[in-house]
Image (cartoon, helix red, strand yellow):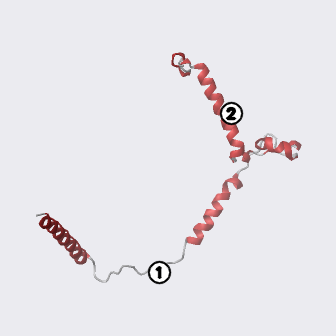
Amino acid sequence: MARRARSSVLSTFFVAAAMCLATQWALLPSGSAFVQPRGQKAADVAPAVGALAALTASLPAEAYSFKGPLTGSEVCTQKPLFYIIAPACDPIFLVSPIYLAPILIVFWGTIITVIQLLIPATQPDEDLR
């Protein structure tokens, strides 16, 4: 009995696969191939896109014309001190995570501390300790 059920399921599967194959062949337009021939192109744009991407990366630094409060001063030429005050000499250094991360930590830390001090609901519950 199990052999009969198995063979009917298997034959149903093969009939369905044959019908799908016949339908595919019937709907396939004549003269088409697996790999289509390439059409004629006026010009290949890949090198132009690569060059444009390389130029785009440098545009923000070229367009940047802001002056910092210490730009051109003697303090900005002394190297040990310059590493600490670089964003004040040239604000383009604010893009660097080395200078921006501590500034953001201090800024948001101050904001969060003020909010926690002004709104008592943000304080932890003493009963839960």
Question: Could you say whether the residue bearing mark 1 is in a helix, strand or loop?
Answer: loop
Residues 127 and 26: in front is 127
CB atoms of marks 1 and 2 within 8 Å: no
Q: Determine whether, in the image, residue 35 is placed left or right of residue 84.
A: left
Question: Which residue appears farthest toward the bottom when viewing the image?
Answer: 31
Residue carrying label 1: 40
Q: Position of residue 9 (x, y in %)?
A: 16, 66
Q: Secondary structure at mark 2?
A: helix
Residue 21, picture quadrant: bottom left
Badge 2: how crowded within 10 Å, few (<14), some, or many (20+)? few
Q: Position of residue 81 (x, y in %)?
A: 84, 42
Residues packed near mark 1 inside 10 Å, few (<14), some (14 to 19) or many (20 plus): few
Hey, what amino acid is under mark 2? Answer: Val
| Along the viewing direction, whichever of 54 and 28 lies nearer the viewer | 28
Spatial CA span between label 1 and label 2 = 59 Å
Q: Nearer the viewer, residue 50 or 111?
A: 111
Q: Amino acid at mark 1?
A: Gln
Vertical order, 60 against 85 (above or below): below
The quadrant the C terminus occupies is top right
For the view shown, which residue lies furthest in the top direction?
A: 127
Image point (20%, 68%), residue name: 13
Residue 113's quadrant in the figure? top right
Residue at the spot 60% in from the left edge and 19% down from the top edge:
118
Which residue lies under the disc numbered 2?
Answer: 106
Q: Is residue 66 above or below residue 4?
A: above
Q: Nearer the viewer, residue 64 or 46?
A: 46
Mark with earlier residue (1, 2): 1
From the top left corner, tell me how far across and down residue 111 is, in percent.
Answer: 63, 28
Of the residues tagged 1 and 2, which is closer to the observer? 2
Residue at 51% x, 16% y: name it. Answer: 127
Left or right of 1, for residue 76 = right
Q: Is residue 97 left or right of residue 79?
A: left
